[in-house]
Image (cartoon, rainbow, N blue to C red):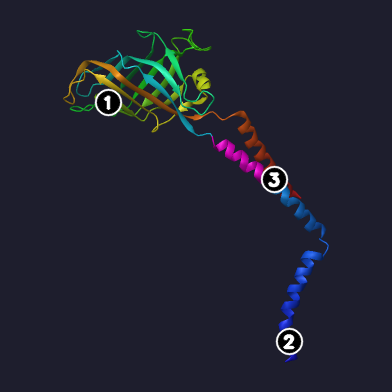
Amino acid sequence: MPKQLIHLGEPVRGLVGKYLKAHYSTPTAEEEGTEMQRPILVLLFSVFFTSLCAFGSETATDTVWQIAGVGGSYSYAGGASDLIASGIAIDSVVDANESSSFGSTFTVIGTNTGGTANLSFTTGAGTAGQYSWTSGGTLTLTGCIENGSSGACIAGETLSTVLVSDEFTSVGIVPIGGGNGFEFGGLEGTLDPVAAAFLNVNQTFTSPASQMDDEVAGVPSIAGSSFSTGVSTTPGGNLDLYAAIAPEPGSTILFGTGLLCIAFVIRKRLFA
């Protein structure tokens, strides 16, 4: 029996010893260093992840260029011919960026009749017997953002500034509003750098989020039929261009500081 008591007592003494050592013994220099490093590491990782969240919170947003729904010209010779548009009126842009001007509408001016900006595009070959163009194409918007109500452009732009330059993958005629309209897919390209800075977005916009639609009159109901009298009509449409919000300098600096701190600590640990 005594032997059994001694055998059972050994683990108990071990546990008691560990408890006393943990709570009442003097820590070694190595243990003190480890304890001091912990709050520093916690602080550094907090800085890193805070800066990462700030940097990563810059999400994609859009600028909505509004088609006035008046005038312009759409033409198609039928068969495998290109679809060609010119003089499509853009009269405003809505800032959908989360900035001080969020939701604000700015007038866009140009050399079109009525003083609007000029949107034009040309597609690749069409599909005979259909209103479908899937060989891509290019689109250009020229004009400028108006400086207040002065009738003049914002600094750095003119009435002939290329505000939008892009490529698209496809165009088709679909029901829009009370009639038919053109719907674009795969828009991607660049904004004028001055306009991008003014709206606080990056220059590059991407597909598939970017898109365009415009309600059009004068298009025959029989798919594949040629036409030369297509015009943009009320209520018009939108050219939605999605681009990443330009990161604020403070977020970029904070992110970089977090990375440098982490790199410094890792280097010290490796070469200590």
Neighbourhood count class around disc 1 (C-alpha, 10 Å): few under 14, some 14–19, many 20 upward: some
Label 3 secondary element: helix
Read off the residue under disc 1. 177
Residue indicated by mark 3: 43
> Is 21 displayed left or right of 215 in the figure?
right
Q: Mark 2 belongs to which amino acid?
A: Leu
Name which residue type carries label 1.
Gly
Marks 3 & 1, CB-CB < 8 Å contact: no
Can residue 266 be seen here?
A: no
At a point 61% along the width and 43% down the height, the residue shown is 49
Residue at 47% over, 12% down: 146
* Magenta residues, start to end: 43-57
Q: Secondary structure at mark 1?
A: loop
Is there CB contact under 8 Å for labels 1 and 2?
no
Please identify the dominant SS of the magenta region: helix
Q: As displayed, is residue 61 above or below residue 139?
A: below
Q: Quadrant of residue 178?
A: top left
Disc nearer the start of the sequence (3/1) = 3
